[in-house]
Image: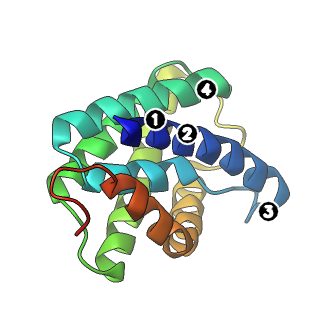
């Protein structure tokens, strides 16, 4: 149970850090989405149902904290977390990076297409640029965060750390 509290705190911190990095260190006007890195790392250690619920809660929290259509991040994050949980635990750095890159790409593509269907303004940045730059940014930052996030994801898990 303690692990879920730590996960919630890590997601909240990731939301704040992502917002700050998007303003202070943007690459071509786009920042990282560290929430997906935290969510995907957590989902790798969970069953698909729990991962989808965590993704929905995380996305809904993100939607409420930033100005985005309510429920759109929840939808994108829950589908992404479910898919990552189906893929299972990453064995090795390259597999981990592949899952993070795939999760970021899928999540932002779902969010972008959902925004377009709802008629939301995409802040003038083309969807392809947002998806590709955020995927690259997350792929660069994920190895730095991986050791800490894996400890959080595997804490108090039945069977212990791998």
Write down the residue under mark 3: 25
Question: Mark 1 packing: few (<14 Cα in 10 Å), some, or many (20+)?
Answer: few
Q: Mark 3 against mark 1, which lies toward the viewer?
A: 1
Question: Mark 4 packing: few (<14 Cα in 10 Å), some, or many (20+)?
Answer: some
Write down the residue under mark 4: 68
Q: CA distance from mark 2 to mark 3?
A: 23 Å
Question: Mark 3 packing: few (<14 Cα in 10 Å), some, or many (20+)?
Answer: few
Q: Nearer the viewer, residue 90 or 98?
A: 90
Q: Give the secondary structure at mark 4.
A: loop
Write down the residue under mark 2: 9
Image location (x, y in percent) of residue 131: 52, 56
Tell whether 123 sits left or right of 35: right
Identity of the residue drawn at 35% across and 61% down: 102
Residue 57 location, quadrant: top left
Q: Give the secondary structure at mark 3.
A: loop
Q: Earlier in the sequence, mark 4 or mark 1?
A: 1
Image location (x, y in percent) of residue 32: 62, 57
Q: Earlier in the sequence, mark 3 or mark 1?
A: 1
Q: CA distance from mark 4 to mark 3?
A: 21 Å
Q: Quadrant of the image for the N terminus?
A: top left
Identity of the residue drawn at 52% across and 47% down: 35
Q: CA distance from mark 4 to mark 2?
A: 21 Å
- CB-based contact (under 8 Å), mark 4 and mark 3: no
Image location (x, y in percent) of residue 89: 22, 63
- CB-based contact (under 8 Å), mark 2 and mark 1: yes
Q: Give the secondary structure at mark 2.
A: helix
Q: Earlier in the sequence, mark 4 or mark 2?
A: 2
User: On screen, 117 above or below 96?
Assistant: above
């Amino acid at each position: 149970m303690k692990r879920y509290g730590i996960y919630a705190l890590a997601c909240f911190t990731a939301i704040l850090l992502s917002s700050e990095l998007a303003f202070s260190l943007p690459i071509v006007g786009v920042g990282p989405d560290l929430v997906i890195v935290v969510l995907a790392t957590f989902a790798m250690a969970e069953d698909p149902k729990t991962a989808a619920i965590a993704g929905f809660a995380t996305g809904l929290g993100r939607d409420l904290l930033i100005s985005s259509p309510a429920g759109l991040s929840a939808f994108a994050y829950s589908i992404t977390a479910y898919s990552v949980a189906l893929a299972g635990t990453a064995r090795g750095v390259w597999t981990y990076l592949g899952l993070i890159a795939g999760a970021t790409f899928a999540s932002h593509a779902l969010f972008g297409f959902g925004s377009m269907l709802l008629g939301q303004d995409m802040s003038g940045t083309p969807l392809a640029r947002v998806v590709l730059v955020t995927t690259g940014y997350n792929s660069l930052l994920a190895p730095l965060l991986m050791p800490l996030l894996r400890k959080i994801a595997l804490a108090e898990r039945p069977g212990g750390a791998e």
